[in-house]
Image: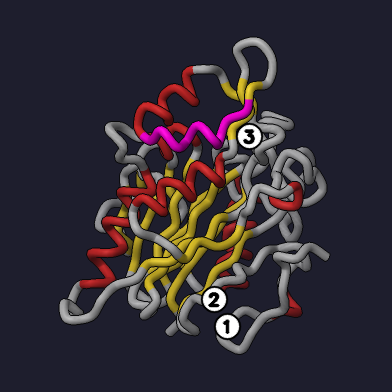
Amino acid sequence: MYAWRHLLSRRTILKPETLPSDWLLPDWPAPRSVHAVFTSRAGGVSEAPFDAMNLGDHVGDALHDVQRNRALLGELLQAQPTFLQQVHGRFVARLPATVPAPIVADASVSNQPGQACTVMVADCLPVLFTDTQGRAVAAAHAGWRGLLGQDGQGVLEATYKEISALAQAGSAQEATEIIAWLGPCIGPQKFEVGPEVPAAFMAQQPEAAACFVPHGPGKWLADLPELARLRLQALGVHGIYGNDGSPAWCTVSNSLRFFSYRRSPICGRMAASIWLGN
């Protein structure tokens, strides 16, 4: 049993007997009204190579199986997950959305109970946010392109801005502290990139050099969760939990537990969801 898997506490509305044993429940000091989960391959109805809890409707899986998996997720969460059409950008949708699906965005934010901000991943980094008062929640999909963004403003900066504003609304006299949880992603021993990637990050943030290790001619190994930590710390987020870059969090290395596009381009998608309880 991995260290990041822990028993359900009193503050969650999830039923432990109904969850697949290898789904992740964030171990972080979120308020009792905040609930979150990260799915694994287990628990759904999809057939190989999408077995079994594939939540992506764009990967070639039978759509009726994907729809059943998404319905199962909602039943287990006792909340309404909203799936995004992710494009490795930095747009943040506010839920419930005022536009019809599909919602083109790489993050979502909400202060409405039962509205589950949800992102799908299969190597990219999922980042969940809440404020310490439990007024708002957010989920962001952070591959290296979305993380980098433009002019130092990527998906994490955009999500932080939106959740801070939503949590602060109506509470101008109270300080707003945001905390974040990093989910599983491709690990620093598996994420090979070209020289343009470290160059782009270091141009925005020189200390990002520590997140890249030379790996043969013209190749580097990148530490995606550490790059995210640097960006969050620059925003003033000090409570950062979850993925520490160790092998247990690597989607590529843990083939029985996680989908991985880098390991096999034909694969399913997992989801990170966060919502406020009623």
Check disc 1: other Cα within 10 Å, few if <14, some if 14-19, many if 20+.
some
Question: Left or right of 139: which side holds 177?
Answer: left
Which residue does the image show at 27% across and 32% down from the upper left? Answer: 151
Reading the image, the residue beneath label 3 is: 60
Q: Earlier in the sequence, mark 1 or mark 2?
A: 1
Q: Is 14 contained in the magenta span?
A: no
Name the disc covering residue 78, or none: 2
Question: Label 3 sits on what residue type?
Answer: Gly
Q: Can you give x and y, in whole percent of width and height, for residue 242 in the image? A: 60, 60
Q: Quadrant of the C terminus?
A: bottom left
Element class at badge 2: loop
User: On screen, 241 above or below 102?
Assistant: below
Q: Can you give x and y, in whole percent of width and height, for residue 8 in the image? A: 67, 80
Magenta stretch bounds = 205-213
Element class at badge 1: loop
Name the disc covering residue 72, or none: none
State yes or no: discs 3 and 2 in contact (Cβ < 8 Å): no
Q: Is 208 contained in the magenta span?
A: yes
Element class at badge 3: loop
User: On screen, 22 above or below 210?
Assistant: below
Residue 62 in sight from this viewpoint: no
Asked where in the image residue 49 lies, by quadrant, the reply is: top right
Reading the image, the residue beneath label 1 is: 13
Asked where in the image residue 18 lies, by quadrant, the reply is: bottom right
Front tag of 3 and 2: 2
Say which of 164 and 260 sits in front: 164
Say which of 79 and 211 sits in front: 211
State yes or no: discs 1 and 2 in contact (Cβ < 8 Å): yes
